[in-house]
Image: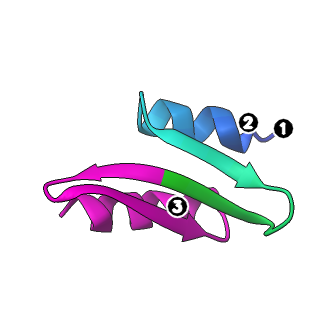
Amino acid sequence: MNPDPAWVISQRFPGLIFWFGRSTRSWWAVVRVPAGWRLVEAADTDQLTRAVLEART
């Protein structure tokens, strides 16, 4: 049985603000970056992980 995707992303990034958009069918996160905040979107939690890591660098 696969774990809940929301649980997986919360374990990868404790304190991250993220959600699944029912209308957009996408995963979203608000990421703290040196210049402030950035909104990222992804099709699944693996892509969201990559987007969060890319936004932080």
User: Which residue is rendered at x = 44% and y = 37% of the image?
Assistant: 16
Looking at the picture, which amino acid does disc 1 mark?
A: Met
Residue 48 lies in the magenta-colored region? yes
Cβ–Cβ below 8 Å for labels 3 and 2? no
Horizontal placement of 28 versus 57: left or right? Answer: right
Cβ–Cβ below 8 Å for labels 2 and 1? yes
Looking at marks 3 and 1 on the same chain, the residue that comes earlier in the sequence is marked by 1
Residue 1 marker: 1
Tell me if I can see residue 34 in this picture. yes
Looking at the picture, which amino acid does disc 2 mark?
A: Pro
Residue at disc 2, secondary structure: loop
User: Which residue is rendered at x = 45% and y = 62% of the image?
Assistant: 39
Tell me the quarter of the image containing the C terminus: bottom left
The magenta region covers 30-57
Residue bearing mark 3: 48
Horizontal placement of 27 versus 17: left or right? Answer: right
From the viewer's side, name the closer residue of 48 and 19.
19
Looking at marks 3 and 2 on the same chain, the residue that comes earlier in the sequence is marked by 2
Residue at the left extreme, as displayed: 34
User: Which residue is rendered at x = 45% and y = 50% of the image?
Assistant: 30
Q: Nearer the viewer, mark 3 or mark 1?
A: 3
| Residue 41 screen position, x and y as percent | 56, 68
| Residue 11 screen position, x and y as percent | 49, 31
Residue at the front extreme, as displayed: 36
